[in-house]
Image (spheres, rainbow, N blue to C red):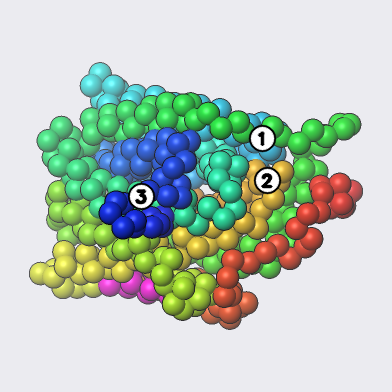
Amino acid sequence: MISTLSTRKTKGVAATNIRLDGLWKHPDFLKFWAGETVSLFGTQITLLALPLTAVLLLNATPSQMGLLTAIEFAPFLFITLFAGVWIDRKRRRPVLVASNLGRGILLASVPAAALMGWLTIEYLFIVVFLFGILGVFFEVAYQSFLPSLLEREDLVEGNSKLFASASAAEIGGPGLAGLLVGAITAPFALVLDAASFFFAGGSLWLIRKPEPGPMRQEGRRHVLREIKHGIQVTFSDRYLRLFAAEATTYNFFNQVFTTLLVLYATRDLRLGPSVLGLVFAVGSIGSLLGSVLAARTVRRFGLGKTITCSAAVSCFSPLLVPLAGVLPGMSVPILMASYFATGLGVSLCNVHVFSARQALMPDRLRGRMTASYRFITWGAIPLGALLSGLLADAIGLWPTLMLGAMGLTTPWLWFLFSPVRKLREMPRPDGAPDATEAELKIAA
């Protein structure tokens, strides 16, 4: 699944005063957390404002909407593996800073182009493609950087806090986005997200903890061989294979389902930006609840059951959305219920899957392993988006949504019929945890 951030434990209440322990006393993590929180709020604005710019201002067709999403995520198919090798050779924090600043500049160019009368659907294609390239480097570096900032035992707490921020942003962001789009139009609402990327970049720059340098290797280094190595090590672990299989299946069908959702809601259901923002916000309340409950559900039911059951909730709840077109008088409550349940399930599942993946990846290989994982799981997104646009042109919006929702009922089966369901605690790598890179033989 696509998101990954979570809650923290606030420990200890003294006899007469409250004490903040854990990561609350980690100044560098607090800088990182603050920057990501602001950026996540801005991203929620873009998630609504960008497709509304295409639909309302540029009159985009279903196939153009599918192409818009496919172009944004296409870099995950073409450059992710190379980015992983490159990032393993570099410190991750400068990459994160540059990615944030670059994405801020790209988003700021959209309202500038609209103001000057230059904005076209083709210009949006270029912007989202470059945005996607920077997103590849950010995602790979981000997942590699956090474990170097925190100790292993703090990963769940750190991811939980970040996920709680994501959920809070998803609650407030869509409503704010709807109001902004209504007040200043969709392209100009993107200015706030651009500013949030600049803020996030500055927060990362202020982190003072030294980042470990990349492992030096003797002799000539072969990019393709290192890519192959990353793929081999990543998918030699049975849990990473299962996590990747579930995420790939989910992302493909979810993209078939969600690519045209804004178009369907505005044209077929005739919902305005503010109502659509409210629907997204209610769904995000479910995400926040999931992040808050993440730790206690594992203590109560165990890791495997929590992951499997929460994945099932997120996979079946989208079936409610097509009902909104059949029962138009109930469309808004139905959409809210579906989004709430989806957010709850995705959040509960992703907090623990994300933490498990980080724990299973050694630092020296984390860039390549993250890239290998992302290549498979996010590479399905542009394919699902393209299929969504083609299907909508051929059979219509509602049947396409229905097919996507039906496909989404299958991903959780990867967990149900696997060792994941029986996990009681965080898994460890299948191989020797301290094996050096030299000991991991690479086939010629």
Residue pictured at 37% horizontal, 66% vertical: 293
Residue 390 shows in this picture: no
Look at the numbered disc 1 and give the secondary structure of its residue.
Answer: loop
Q: Toward which corner of the image does residue 281 lie, by quadrant?
A: bottom left
Q: Toward which corner of the image does residue 31 lie, by quadrant?
A: top left
| Magenta region, main secondary structure | helix
Which tag, 3 or 1, sits closer to the chain's start? 3
Alpha carbon separation for disc pair 2 and 3: 32 Å
Q: Nearer the viewer, mark 1 or mark 2?
A: 1
Q: Say which amino acid is labelled 3.
A: Arg
Q: Which residue is mark 1?
A: 212
Mark 1 and mark 2 in contact? Answer it, CB < 8 Å: yes
The vertical placement of 282 against 315, above or below, is above
Residue pictured at 46% horizontal, 78% vertical: 301
Q: Nearer the viewer, mark 3 or mark 1?
A: 3
The vertical placement of 427 against 145, above or below, is below
Q: Say which amino acid is labelled 2.
A: Asp
Q: Which residues are magenta?
A: 312-321
Q: Which residue is mark 3?
A: 19
Characterize the local packing of mark 2: few (<14), some (14-19) or many (20 or more) Cα atoms within 10 angstroms: some
Q: Which residue is mark 2?
A: 363
Foreground of the two, 60 or 188: 188
Residue pictured at 57% horizontal, 75% vertical: 424
